[in-house]
Image: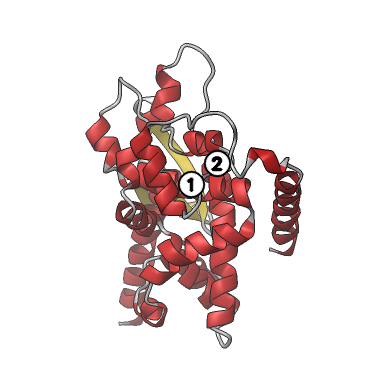
Amino acid sequence: MAKLWHKLSSLAFHRSQSRNDEPETTGKTDSSAPPFPDTTNSWLTGLLGFTPYHPGIYLIALTHRSVVHDQTEPADSNQRLEFLGDAVLDLIISEHLYTSFPDSDEGKLSNNRAKIVNRKSLADFAGKISLGEHLLIGESADKNTIQTSESALADAFEALIGAIYLDTGLTETKKFILRHVIEHVDLQKLDAVEHNYKSRLIEYTQSRQIASPVYTVVSEEGAEHEKLFTIEVSCDGIILGKGTAGRKKDAEQSAAKEALAALETKTSIETD
């Protein structure tokens, strides 16, 4: 985490420096016109509370991978920004939980973070800001399905965070996450929900000296922008669970849930 913080802080510093070096006559925004419709531009400005410094990065954040699938020439989707946004979100949420739960150990903090940044929660946060309505979607894809897809919304929400970070640095990104994530989470009720099955499976196996879980992709089906992944989880070569979902992370969670049920049932039988 320390290395990640150093890298992100360094990148944010350089972004901030580059913006400070911009001539005052250019104002806060690029001189070019926003690369998206006026309705999206107004929505984005209202959402952020400022006019984007580099609108092009937000265009990428709003571009679903189905657009790239339809293009004959190279184009950018929001997948790389999703990767960055995921790391930034984890960092900021981790810092917030660290200060909010001074008596929690590493395992509890990790579980609480997972409850906040799971795909369903991120999709809910995206829904609250009407993010789906502003996604750019390929002509060959089902627009209505993608606009309401838990996976697509969660990805776009993380990509948007990545864009805000690259455009403004950590300070504004933290403000955005505070407004649109933390303020919608009841931190005191986090302990009442246990749905991070991967973490629970690791805790279960470690407490019983069982080999660590291994996740294996056994199949990938569907078009590039609508894939379904099937993943098996095993311990010491024994398959304990299987899960299928549009994202590998979600398939792993389903597999872990099934594995936990199998292990807990086996334990219950042995102790009877």
Against 51, is 197 above or below?
A: below
Of residues 173 and 203, the one drawn nearer to the viewer in this rendering: 173
Using the rendered image of the protein, determine whether residue 32 is visible from the camera's viewpoint.
yes
Please name whichever residue, 126 or 223, is drawn nearer the observer in this view of the structure: 126
Lower position in the chain sequence, tag 1 or tag 2: 2
Marks 1 and 2 sit apart, C-alpha to C-alpha, by 7 Å
x, y percent for residue 202: 51, 66
Q: Identify the disc placed on residue 160.
A: 1
Residue 9 drawn at (x, y percent): 72, 57
Disc 1 secondary structure class: helix
Residue 100, numbered label: none
Q: Position of residue 84 (x, y in %)?
A: 59, 47
Q: Is residue 189 above or below residue 197?
A: below
Q: Nearer the viewer, mark 1 or mark 2?
A: 1
| Front one among 43 and 60 | 43
Q: Residue at x 54, y 33 (%)?
A: 56
- Determine the image quadrant of residue 271: bottom left
Left or right: residue 52 versus residue 246 is: right
| Amino acid at pointer 2 | Leu
In contact (CB < 8 Å): disc 1 and disc 2: yes
Q: Which quadrant of the view contains residue 62?
A: top left
Q: Looking at the image, which residue is at 74% across and 54% down?
A: 13
Label placed on residue 81: 2
Helix, strand or loop at label 2? It is: helix
